[in-house]
Image (cartoon, grey):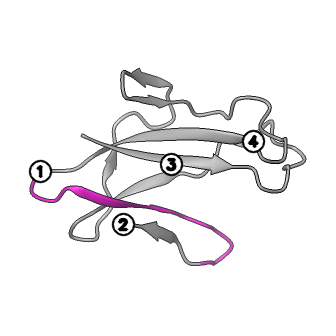
Amino acid sequence: MFFVRATLVDIDGMADASSYTGPQLVGVTASGGDADYLFGNAEVKLPHCTMIPAAPGPWGVKGARRDVCDIQIASAGDPVTGARVDVGNNEPDIIWH
């Protein structure tokens, strides 16, 4: 079990943020594959990682910050070493290592 954490910042004050759930973070393993999800789109609270599918208010305010944590599953022999987010619109993924 691995935890992918990120801090999201609403840079431009998104107009209709009520339905925004944030990016889908995907764990990237050492071999370059995708890690598996444990809980999907459920709310999960652990002492060091809380997964909340919907953004808390006031998310539509310029400069608002949100900490996110996703639980990823991978084998010890091929651990999660980074994360990626699908940008969409035929743009390449953003990958962090």
Q: Secondary structure at mark 1?
A: loop
Q: Secondary structure at mark 3?
A: strand
Q: Quadrant of the N terminus?
A: top left
Q: What crowding class fits label 4: few (fewer than 14 Cα within 10 Å), some (14-19), or many (20 or more)?
A: some
Percent across and percent down for residue 72 are 33, 45
- Farthest residue in the front direction? 63
Q: Which residue is mark 1?
A: 76
Asked if residue 4 lies left or right of residue 18, the reply is left
| Amino acid type indicated by mark 4 | Ala
Q: Which residue is mark 3?
A: 6
Q: CA distance from mark 3 to mark 2?
A: 12 Å
Query: Which residues lie in the magenta part?
Result: 76-91
Q: Quadrant of the C terminus?
A: bottom left
Precedes in sequence: disc 3 or disc 2: 3
Q: Which residue is mark 4?
A: 64
Q: CA distance from mark 3 to mark 1?
A: 22 Å
User: Which quadrant of the figure has residue 32?
Assistant: bottom left
Precedes in sequence: disc 4 or disc 3: 3
Precedes in sequence: disc 3 or disc 1: 3
User: Which quadrant of the figure has residue 38?
Assistant: top left
| Amino acid type indicated by mark 2 | His
Q: Which residue is mark 2?
A: 97
Percent across and percent down for residue 42 are 49, 28
Q: Is residue 90 above or below residue 41?
A: below
Q: What crowding class fits label 2: few (fewer than 14 Cα within 10 Å), some (14-19), or many (20 or more)?
A: few
- The residue at the point 63 percent across, 39 percent down is 66
Badge 3 vs badge 2, beta-carbon distance below 8 Å: no
